[in-house]
Image (cartoon, rainbow, N blue to C red):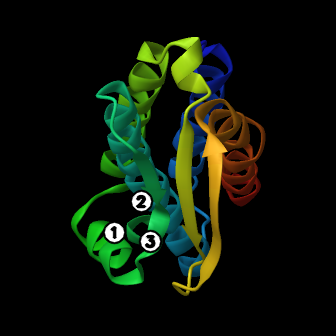
């Protein structure tokens, strides 16, 4: 699959994360929000990569974001990492996801993925089937840009 737009979305996100990381005026709640978002994205990318690897192996792909919404896990990651380390995790995990998606053929891009979404409180929001093409488009058009916009707004 073509990953140009996905790669650009990650580049914009990482640029925004780097800018907000140099901001010395963040309120504690804003700093916590930045940390939450970076941990959430890094964890999401691990989940997405694992699902893409399953597709590459001819196995069913399931994307369940519960772990990426886990308040305790995210708090633990935040407490034991620096902002720079969180940005590196997003960069590393995002690159792994992009690499897996690049390996998917066009026909594999049409493969159905079980997408199970939870909100920050752990409540089930969605349980649906979606193709890899649709999932990547959702990530490129909505998910990553929303996080990028929030990080950019917090840096101001």
Q: Quadrant of the N terminus?
A: top right
For residue 33, which quarter of the picture?
Answer: bottom right
Of the pair 19 and 36, the residue shown nearer to us: 36
> Does label 3 or label 1 sit earlier along the sequence?
3
Q: Are marks 2 and 1 in contact (CB under 8 Å)?
A: yes
Residue 127's place in the image compared with 102, above or below, is below
Horizontally, residue 66 falls left or right of residue 113, namely: left
Kind of element beneath mark 2: helix
Residue 35's place in the image compared with 27, above or below, is above
> Does label 2 or label 1 sit earlier along the sequence?
2
For residue 50, which quarter of the picture?
Answer: top left
Q: Kindly identify which residue carries mark 1.
A: 78
Horizontally, residue 134 falls left or right of residue 30, namely: right
Write the residue at 58% across / 67% down.
117
Give the alpha-carbon distance from disc 3 to disc 1, as whole Å: 17 Å
Horizontally, residue 102 falls left or right of residue 107, namely: left
- Give the percent coordinates (x, y) of residue 3: 58, 17
Q: Which label lies toward us, 2 or 1? A: 2
Kind of element beneath mark 3: helix
Q: Quadrant of the C terminus?
A: bottom right
For residue 99, which quarter of the picture?
Answer: top left
Q: Kindly identify which residue carries mark 3.
A: 66
Give the alpha-carbon distance from disc 3 to disc 2, as whole Å: 13 Å
How crowded pointer 3 is (Cα within 10 Å; few <14, some 14-19, many 20+) is rated as: many
Residue 55's place in the image compared with 117, above or below, is above
How crowded pointer 2 is (Cα within 10 Å; few <14, some 14-19, many 20+) is rated as: many
Kind of element beneath mark 1: helix
Q: Kindly identify which residue carries mark 2.
A: 39
One can see residue 137 in this view: yes
- Give the percent coordinates (x, y) of residue 40: 47, 61
Horizontally, residue 88 falls left or right of residue 9, namely: left
Of the pair 47 and 51, the residue shown nearer to us: 51
């Amino acid at each position: 699959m073509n990953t140009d737009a996905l790669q650009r979305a990650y580049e914009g996100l990482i640029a925004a994360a780097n800018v907000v990381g140099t901001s010395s005026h963040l309120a504690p709640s804003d700093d916590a929000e930045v940390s939450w978002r970076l941990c959430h994205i890094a964890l999401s990318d691990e989940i997405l990569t694992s699902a893409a690897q399953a597709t590459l192996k001819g196995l069913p792909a399931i994307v369940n974001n519960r772990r990426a919404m886990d308040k305790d896990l995210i708090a633990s990651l935040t407490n034991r990492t620096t902002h720079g380390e969180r940005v590196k995790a997003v960069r590393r995990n995002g690159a792994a996801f992009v690499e897996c998606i690049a390996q998917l053929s066009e026909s594999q891009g049409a493969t159905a993925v079980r997408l199970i979404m939870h909100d920050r409180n752990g409540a089930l929001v969605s349980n649906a089937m979606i193709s890899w093409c649709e999932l990547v488009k959702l990530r490129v058009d909505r998910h990553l840009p929303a996080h990028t916009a929030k990080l950019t707004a917090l840096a101001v």
